[in-house]
Amino acid sequence: MEFILQTAFGLLKLMALIFIIIVPLIIILELFRSYGVLEKLTKLISPLTSRLGFEKDSVFPLLAGIVFGISYGGGVLVGEAKKGRIVGNQAFLVALFLALCHAIFEDTLIFIAQGAIWWIVVLTRVATAFMITALVAIWLKKQGHP
Amino acid sequence: MTETPETHTSTEISISFKESLYEGLRQGLYSFYTLFKIMTPVYILISILKEIAVLEILAGYFSPFMKFLGLPGETALAVVLGWTVNLYAAIAAFAGLGLSIRQVTILAVMLGISHSHFMETAIISRMKARPWLILLIRIVTSLFIGALMNLILPENF
């Protein structure tokens, strides 16, 4: 009996935490999407991203994936690639970065609720994605792929 | 299908705010429902395994590997569920284990880098971006970063 009560209480607490994170987060992200917040942000940070070696048209799918998740970012990436705006290894590098680092708000928040330290999680994940993508980009260049 | 002509007036903008608020709420509740369906059985199963002391036995097999990541053997199940199902299944699997802040932080980074591989590899293959290479990079990076964090992070915080 004690086991059942304990499990039920633990489960209730867990699901309550997930509820108060997920529902407001999805509402905020939906508002972001309908007001084109990321389109504006893309323009704002374009001087920085071009210095880092990202081509202009790959920044939006990258940001979309980092904020909204890999299926949304991936969809944008496929769309841009079809229009011929992202060519060659750029598409692969965006996909690689997104695979390592996406849905950063959602993933971080649900782990914070379990006790994780948010800045370690965010910094380590973003830095890792940057380093791995940069290493692979250098390797591809050495292989002679444009 | 008939198309309604689009007009842009100020009243429509305020309606669209309400509409996207409603749309967000609908999506949020639906997502919660799908997560609830995954997390509940996982949490109950892990609790039962712990209660009947089977989790301990399983943990014994995994602890020689997990100790390199600074994690107890019990969390191996969470990592496997994270890799195959998703992060929510992983969280349901370790939520009842009473992990330390350090352990949850390591798990958060490792699982953040590497998770939901069946679903996400399918998404990446649609991007025509060498999905198997990306899968390999994710798993290797996650294990490497986990071990590195275990070396760097102070023992008690």
Image: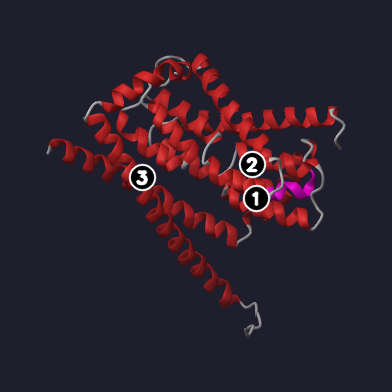
Q: Give the mark nearest the N terminus, 1 or 2.
A: 1
Magenta segment's dominant SS is helix
Q: Is residue B29 left or right of residue A94?
A: left
Tag on residue A98?
2
Q: Foreground: B118 or A26?
A: B118
Residue that mark 1 sits on? A74
Contact check, label 1 and label 2, Cβ < 8 Å:
yes
Q: Which mark is residue A43?
A: none
Q: Check disc 3 and report the residue beneath it.
A: B39
Q: Nearer the viewer, mark 3 or mark 2?
A: 3
As displayed, is residue B6 above or below residue B142? below
**Residue type, mark 3 in image:** Met
Q: Kindly identify the residue that appears in the image at 67 percent across and 50 percent down.
A: B126
Residue at 71% across, 43% down: B129
Chain bearing mark 2? A
Q: Quadrant of residue B103?
A: top left
Query: Can marks 1 and 3 be said to lie on one chain?
Result: no
